[in-house]
Image (cartoon, rainbow, N blue to C red):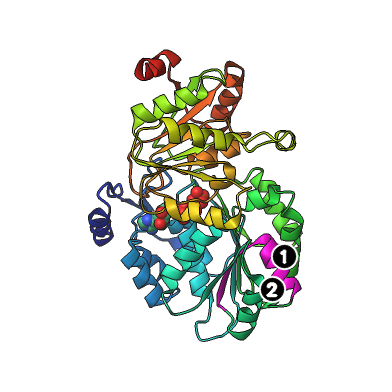
């Protein structure tokens, strides 16, 4: 314990060691005679990403995850488990089906990937694990982490929308990768072309599960995948998300439809606080016309290290009328008016895959100001993002949670990160509803303070 805390303190400057454990000895008398119960009680901090630090990641995974994977994890900087990792890994590594339900940026990806590495046989040449993701960008990111941990011990293939499926099919047949990270449409095409069967898969992970179930384009294919996988002889199913609305109902559906085994566990970390506590939420009330100038003023006063500006997706009606999307208007305005050092980049669904890939790789590694639709709100892990701006109010509280969760993603760091939402007077009650649902406080920034800076 002391060693783990010291290693964590060295690796993460902002890390604070866990609160001390208190041990109680209780001696109840039963019909079998007296015996001693030893209770170890450690007070919990409020944040979900507090270092659990009862043990190192290596200790939690000992004997289950291959040593070379753990060594890679340590080299990357994964030394101490986050709370969701500490709670879920003992279950995951014993083969239990799990629903991982924990705040954004809490480390769910590493939890399920370690489980994948513990289940696969590195000497076998076959597809053994599947990670299903909702977007190409999240797929690229998860593939990167999986390859980082695998080093060269096994192959990880990305089977994503816009990929070269014909060539990949030949590859899967000739040299099957042990792990495939796939978007739903690409995976379905591959299974239909009989490149591999789901029955041979040992672990199936569905990341951002509520998003895929909520997507009219993806839900029926996902159901088919889950039903087909339920016939696999040796299987483990893992679902992950920071938001699982009606989770009891979902748990019930999993068992009833046999998407999981009957003893599936819902690992729900910090249910009373759905969002990280170190996010600082603000809002400005202004008219639609004032929004671009208010945004500029906010960027000048906040001077973000990197930022994501979320803009609503263009409606079908507006597309048909031939209007340019609002994202383009924001990008154009910022490229002309913003005088800071960050690159202004664009990411949205309607861009072709090459342009999307270019934007995504541009944001890696240097300061950026990314103007994006909700496509960047799920799973994107760009830890240098210090500020989020909701240029348009998100449609739902869940969308707010995921957009806000693109910042504050450094586990063990308590640095405050900003989330600012621009709303009209009429939208105020919607933001209040989000605050009630997600249990956070949002402070008003008076409009006058904005214009003092720009004038
Ligand atoms: N044990 C750990 N030690 C240090 N850093 C970690 C650890 N686990 C995860 N991280 C880092 O924390 C960040 C967030 O992790 P991850 O992307 O897995 O979050 P998540 O729970 O999947 O979030 P979201 O719900 O937003 O997708 C990543 O940058 C990751 O590298």
Q: Secondary structure at mark 2?
A: helix
Quadrant location of the N terminus? bottom left
**Closer to the N terminus: mark 2 or mark 1?**
2
Q: Which residue is mark 2?
A: 198
Quadrant location of the C terminus? top left
Mark 2–mark 1 CB contact (< 8 Å)? yes
- Which quadrant of the picture is home to ligand 1? bottom left
Which residue is at the front of the view, 74 or 292? 292
- Which x, y percent locates residue 118? 49, 73
Specify whether residue 189 is painted magenta: yes
User: Residue 225: which numbered mark, if any?
Assistant: 1
**How packed is label 2: few (under 14 Cα within 10 Å), some, or many (20 or more)?**
many
> Is 442 located above or below residue 140 in the figure?
above
Specify whether residue 6 is painted magenta: no
Residue at x-position 42% and y-position 30% = 337
Residue at x-position 64% and y-position 83% = 173
Can residue 53 be seen at all in this image of the molecule?
Answer: yes
Q: Which residues are magenta?
A: 177-193
Mark 2, ligand 1, within 8 Å: the answer is: no
- Which x, y percent locates residue 160? 61, 63
Residue at x-position 71% and y-position 53% = 252
Report the Cα–Cα distance between label 2 and label 1.
8 Å
Q: Secondary structure at mark 1?
A: helix
- Which x, y percent locates residue 197? 70, 76
């Amino acid at each position: 314990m002391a060693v783990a805390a010291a290693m964590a303190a060295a690796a993460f400057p902002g890390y604070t060691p866990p609160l001390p454990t208190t041990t109680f000895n209780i001696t109840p008398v039963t019909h079998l005679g007296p015996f001693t119960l030893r209770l170890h009680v450690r007070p919990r901090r409020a944040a979900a990403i507090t270092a659990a630090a009862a043990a190192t990641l290596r200790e939690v995974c000992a004997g289950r995850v291959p040593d070379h994977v753990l060594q890679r994890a340590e080299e990357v900087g994964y030394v101490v488990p986050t709370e969701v990792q500490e709670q879920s890994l003992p279950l995951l590594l014993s083969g239990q089906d799990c629903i991982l339900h924990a705040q954004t940026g809490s480390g769910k990806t590493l939890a399920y990937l370690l489980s994948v590495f513990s289940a696969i046989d590195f000497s076998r040449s076959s597809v053994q694990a599947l990670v299903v993701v909702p977007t190409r960008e999240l797929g690229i990111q998860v593939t990167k982490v999986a390859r980082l941990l695998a080093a060269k011990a096994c192959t990880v293939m990305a089977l994503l929308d816009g990929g070269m499926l014909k060539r990949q099919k030949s590859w899967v047949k000739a040299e099957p990768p042990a792990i495939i990270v796939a978007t739903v449409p690409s995976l379905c095409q591959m299974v239909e072309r009989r490149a591999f069967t789901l029955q041979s898969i040992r672990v199936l992970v569905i990341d951002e599960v509520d998003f895929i179930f909520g997507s009219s384009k993806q839900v029926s294919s996902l159901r088919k995948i889950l039903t087909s996988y339920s016939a696999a002889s040796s299987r483990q199913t893992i679902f992950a998300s920071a938001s699982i609305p009606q989770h009891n109902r979902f748990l019930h559906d999993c068992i009833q439809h046999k998407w999981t085994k009957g003893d599936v566990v819902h690992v729900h970390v910090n249910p009373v606080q759905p969002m990280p506590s170190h996010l600082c939420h603000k809002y400005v009330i202004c008219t639609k016309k004032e929004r671009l100038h208010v945004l500029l003023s906010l960027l000048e006063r906040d001077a973000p290290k990197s930022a994501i500006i979320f803009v609503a997706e263009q409606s079908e009606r507006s597309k048909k009328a031939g209007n340019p999307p609002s994202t383009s208007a924001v990008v154009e305005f910022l490229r002309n008016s913003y005088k800071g050092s960050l690159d202004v980049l664009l990411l949205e669904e309607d861009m072709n895959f090459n342009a999307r890939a270019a934007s995504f790789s541009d944001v890696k590694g240097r300061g950026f100001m990314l103007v994006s639709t909700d496509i960047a709100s799920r799973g994107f892990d760009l830890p240098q993002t210090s500020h989020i701006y909701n240029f348009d109010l998100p449609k739902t509280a869940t969308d707010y949670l995921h957009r806000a969760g693109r910042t504050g993603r450094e586990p063990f760091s308590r640095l405050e990160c900003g989330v600012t939402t621009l709303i009209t007077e009429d939208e105020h009650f919607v933001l209040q509803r989000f605050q009630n649902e997600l249990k956070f406080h949002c402070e008003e920034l008076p409009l006058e303070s904005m214009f003092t800076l720009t004038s």
